[in-house]
Image (cartoon, coloured by chain):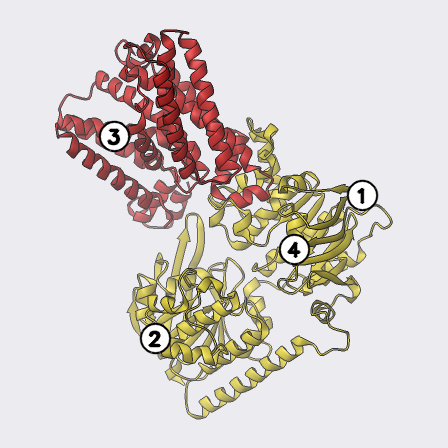
Amino acid sequence: MTLITTDLLLEATGISKTYGAVVALRSASLAVRPGEVHALMGANGAGKSTLLKILTGAVRPDEGTITVRGRQRTVHSPAEARRGGIVSVYQEPALIPDLDIRSNLRLTETPVEPFRHWLGELGMEDLDLSSMARRVPLASLRIIDLARALAIEPDVLMLDEITAALPANLTERVLEVVGRQRGGDRSVIFISHRMIEIAAVCDRATVLREGKTVGVVDVTQGSEERIVELMLGQIVEDMAAIAERTAGSPKASGSTPRLTARGLSSGTKLHDVSFDIQPGEVLGVVALEGQGQDELFDILAGSERPAGGELLVDGSPVSFRHPADAIRAGLVYVAADRAEALLMQRSVRENIALPLTTRIRHWGLIDLAAEGHTVQAAVARLQIDARAGGEVRRLSGGNQQKVTIARWVAGGVHTMLCFDPTRGIDIRTKQQIYLLLRDLAEAGAAVLLYTSELKEVQLVCDRAIVIFGGRVVAEIGVADADEPALLRAAYNLRVDAPMPEDVAGEAVAGVVAAAQESTDAGAERGLPVSDG
Amino acid sequence: MSGLASASGAPNPWLTAAAWRGLFRDRPMIPLLGLLAVLVVISDLVRPGIVSPEWVSVILRAAVLLAILAGCQTLTMLTGGIDLSVGAVASMSGFVVASFAAGAGTPTGIVVALVAAALAGFVTGIGVGVFRVHPLIMTLGMSFVILGLANVWQLQSVVTSTGVPPAFRWLGSQAFADVVPFSLLVFLPVAGLILVALKLTGYGRLLYAIGDNPVAARLSGARSWQVLVVLYVVSALLAAVAGFLYSGYTNVASVTLVDSAVLPSVAAAVIGGTSILGGRGGYGGTIVGTLILTVISSLLSSLGYPEAVRQILFGTIIVAVAAAYTRVTGEA
C-alpha cells in the first residue's frame, strides 16, 4: 500500500492567493490519486473556485507548487492545462451562444466521434449538432460541456457543480458516468453542495475552510457529519432554534393583510394567483422551475405589469408601473441573481445607499454622516465582512448576497420579497439570513419567500403556498410543510401518488451499489483503493 | 490602501509587480501624474528651456477647452454612454453668439445658444433615456441634425467678419500677466461643480449606478430616463460653454469649428481612467488625461514633423497610453 502515497496523479501544495486585502487561499493543498473521484468541499468563500482556477491556469497562484504525475508544472493558461490533461467544466456553460454545437466543438478542437459517444452515455444521443447553442436548454448545455470534456479523455477532469442545473434523470446519468471513471488511471475532481451525490460517487473528500485545507476524509458511511463539521469549523448551531421561533411567534390574525393578490395573471405563465400576507408573517412560495414564480415576483416588484388581477397593500389597491412604485408602496425585492442586484464595481457603501438617492429630491448633496450611520448599522446587522468593501465584486458570494439584503434593511422593511435568497451560499450565511427574516417578521414586516430548498420552508415560514402551472394549487401550514408534502404538492400530485424523489433516490442508491462493486473489484485486482 | 495591505506579507512589497499593480488600481492618479511629469521632462529635453511659465500658460489655454468637452464624455461614459454631439453643439453655440453679436447683442446670443444647446441635449436625452437608442447612434445622429440646422441659420444670417465678441476673445485667448489664462475663470467653477456632483451628490451616485448595472439601478427604484435626460442636457450645456471659449480662443466662428476635438475629448476621458463601459472613473483623472494629451500634442509640434506624421504619432500614442493604462490598472 506504500504505492498509494507516492503515486499521485495530481498534487498541489502550499497554494496561496490574495486579491487585494482578501486572502482567497492560504497554503491550500490537494492530492488526487489515479482512478479516484475526489470531492472538493467547502462553504462559500472557502476557496474552492479559486483553487480550481489555479489548477486550470486561469489564475496564477502567489505561492505553491503543482505536480502532475510527479513532475512539477507551471500552468499559464487553461489551454496549456488542457494540453497537459487537466480539463475543467465550470459552473456556467462555456459555449458560445451564437455558434452551433459543431462550431463550438471545433473551437476547442474536440473530436466529434468520442463526443457523440459520451453524449449517448449521458442520455442525449439525439442532440442535433447544428443547433445554435443559445437555443439549447441550460441542462442540455451542461451535458454538452461534460461530454466535450470527456471526449478529450483528460487525466484530471474537474466538475464544478455540474449537477446544480440538472433535472433528476440527467443527474443520475451524470453520476453514473462519473462513477465509472473510478478504478482507471484517470481522476475526477468533483464539487457539489449535495451531500448525497458526494456519498454516491466520491472516494475521498478534501475540505477547505477559509482558504486552508482542513482535512482529507475517506467518503464512507457516516462521513457526511465529519465533512460538515470540517467545513464549518465548529458544530452547526442548532437550526431547530430558528424553527422553534417560527412556531412560537404570535400571528396577527383578522387584521388587514399587508399584501393581497387577487387573481393575478400574466401571459401564458401565470393564471389566477391569489394569496395574502399578514404583517409579521413569512409566507413561503414553493414551485418547480418555471411554474410562474418568476413572473409573480416580477409583478410584485413592479418590473412587469400583470395582464389581470388586483394587488392591495394594506387594503388599498395599487398598480406598479416601475420598481420605484413598488418600493414606494413598501415592497422591496431581493433578487436571487446577485449580478442583477449589485453594482459590482462600486463600494459596499454605495450599493447599500443606492435606494436612498433614487428620487429626484434626493439628487442633491448627500448627508455623508447620516448615510454613513445608516450603512454602518446595516453592515453590522447583517454581519457583512466589508474588508474588501471598495468593490463589491471582490466580496465572497455570501457577503454579496448580504449586501443585496442590507440595502433594504437600511431603510426599514415594510414588505420584503425574497426570490431564492439563499441559492448557492453557504450554510452559515443561510442561517444568518433565516434569522434576519424572522427578526424582520417579528418587527412587523411581511415577508414573501420563494425558495428552491424545500427544507427552508419549515425553518422560516409560517405558511407556504405551492404554485404549479401558474396557479396556486395548495396552501400548507408550517406544521405539515415537510419536504415530501411540499414536493408532492409542487408536482401537483395526489397524496397517495408515488414520489418522484423516491425514484431518483433509488437510482442514486443503485449507483452507490454499482460503485461499491467496482471498488471491491478494484481491490481484488490490486489497484489503489483508499485506505482509511 | 488595500494594495499596500495585500503586499504586507511579502518580503519586499515595494518591488513586487503585484504591489505596484494594486497601488495603481486603487490610486489611478499616481501613474497618470507620473506620465504627465515624464512628458514634461521629455518636452524640456527635446527643446531645452521650452518649459516656462509662458509654456504652461499656452498648454493650459488649450487644455481647458478640451477638458470641458472631456467632462461631457466623462459624465456620459460613466453611464455607459458617450456624447459625440459635443463638437456640433459647441460649434453651433459659438457660431450663434457670433451671429448675434453685431445685431441683438452678445447676451441675447448667449441665451439663444444655451437654449438651443439645452433643446438639443433634451432631444438626445429623450432618445437615449426613453426610446433606448444607443447613445453612440443618438448623439452621432444629433450632431448631423445640429450641423444641418446651423447651416440653415448660417444662410439666414450672414456673419460679419469680426463676429466673435471681444469678451469671448479676452476669455479664450488672454491671460492674466500673460501667464494665468482667463479661461480658468470659467473652467475652475465648472470643474469644481463636476467633481462635487460626482463625489457628493445623489445624482452623481446614480450616474455610476446606471453605468455599472442598469438592472440593479432600476430594481433599486432609479428611473434612469430622468437621470439620462438631465445628463444629456448638462452635457450639451457644457459643450456650449466650451464652444464659447473655442470661438474666443481661435477668433473664428464656424459651424464645424470644434468637430476635430470630439475624438480627443473621448481619448482624454479614457486615458484619465473612465471606463467606456460605464461605472468607473472620475473627472480628476480626465483633467490629467487632458493635460497629457495637450502636452503630447505640443511636444509633437515642437519636433517640427509634418502634420501627417504628427497625426499618426498622436493616434498611436493615444492608443498605446490607453492600452497600457488599462493593463496596469485593470483587475489582475
Q: Position of residue A383 (x, y in %)?
A: 60, 48
Amino acid carrying mark 4 in the image: Gly
Q: Residue at x 76, y 55 (%)?
A: A274
Q: Which mark is nearer the camera, 4 or 2?
A: 4
Q: Amino acid at mark 2?
A: Pro
Q: Are marks 4 and 2 in contact (CB under 8 Å)?
A: no
Residue holding disc 3? B37
Q: Are marks 2 and 3 in contact (CB under 8 Å)?
A: no
Per the model, the C-alpha gap separating discs 4 and 2 is 43 Å
Q: What is the letter of the red chain?
A: B
Q: Which chain is yellow?
A: A
| Residue density around tag 2, few if under 14, some if 14–19, many if 20 or more, within 10 Å | few
Q: Residue furthest right?
A: A254
Total marks placed = 4
The span from disc 4 to disc 3 (Cα, nearest Å) is 62 Å
Q: How many neighbours does mark 4 have within 10 angstroms: few (below 14), some (14-19), or many (20 or more)? A: few
